[in-house]
Image (tube, rainbow, N blue to C red):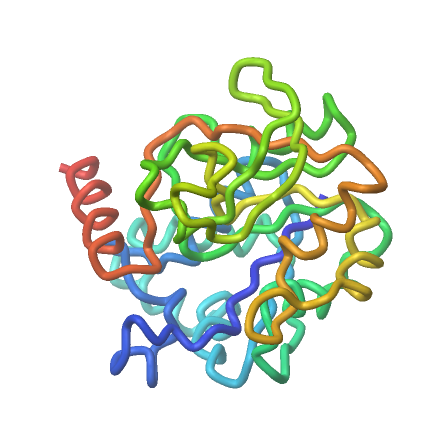
Amino acid sequence: MKAVIPIAGLGTRFLPVTKSVPKEMLPIVDKPVIQYLIEEAAQAGIDEVIMVINDNNEITRKYFTPDPVFEKTIKDKGRSNLTESLQELLNKIKFTYVRQEQPLGDGHAILQAKEAVGNEPFLVLFGDDIIDNEISAAKQLIETFQQKNCSIIALEKIPPEKTKSYGVIAPKSSEGRLHEIESLVEKPEPENAPSNLGIIGKYVCTPEIWQHLETAESSHRGEIRLIDGFRSLINEQPIYGLEIQGQRFDTGTPNGLLGASTHFASKQD
């Protein structure tokens, strides 16, 4: 299975620093956010990562390109241990890059990876959700997909007052942490939310999602959203949601990024 990671956003919550540093390259201790996602994918057995980029992501592309001169310099200084985690990824993962020329929504971004993915199931990871758990969130989703053979959406129980910041599912049936989805609602007011199960940015998608993204009607500021594709796909095949085990950090906000940095720094002490 391949992984798609859309990183073509502008990172407006972190301006002005994201004027020159892409949001996915902001550090959590000594590694950028994007590296945590790719390590998550690698732990789940992924060997190819497709990044959806724009012109601002060249720093990211350079970071994941082997640099023999740099590697030799670090080795000569006896500090190769400082870059071991990155070198392991460069040895394990094939990196492919596709461009999103216009910011037309996360579903549109994922569509740009259609040719690179092909007609097979694929993993989607968004850069705002970092989850610390012995079994990575990606692996939890893929293992569930292998049982159900349909699209799997990552979920988290959320406080009622936060539903208007999330997509929220209406469960048809539930078995422990696994829920068959009846419908999906984008950012409902608390009184209109069908449950307290919020969607977080990790998915396994079946290849049928391509057609539904291509024909989906935009539901948010003229953008094509992944949730729009799922709303259409659910009429054709089941979709399940899985409550992910682990501690989640929303690194799309300054407080979430700070919390992740504090958490992972404490684990290194």
Residue 223, can we see it?
Answer: yes
Q: Residue at x 65, y 36 (%)?
A: 152
Image coordinates for residue 214, horizontal then vertical, percent: 80, 66
Image height of 253 relative to 157, above or below = below
| In-image side of 219 versus 83 (left or right) | right
Q: Residue at x 23, y 42 (%)?
A: 264
Image height of 250 relative to 70, above or below = above
- Front-most of residues 86 and 134: 134
Q: Residue at x 71, y 47 (%)?
A: 122
Image coordinates for residue 153, horizontal then vertical, percent: 60, 39
- Front-most of residues 262 and 76: 262
Where, quadrant-wise, is the N terminus in this rendering? top right
- Front-most of residues 216 and 160: 160
Q: Which residue, as the protein is rendered here, is positioned at the far front?
A: 191
| In-image side of 26 versus 64 (left or right) | left
Image coordinates for residue 47, horizontal then vertical, percent: 65, 47
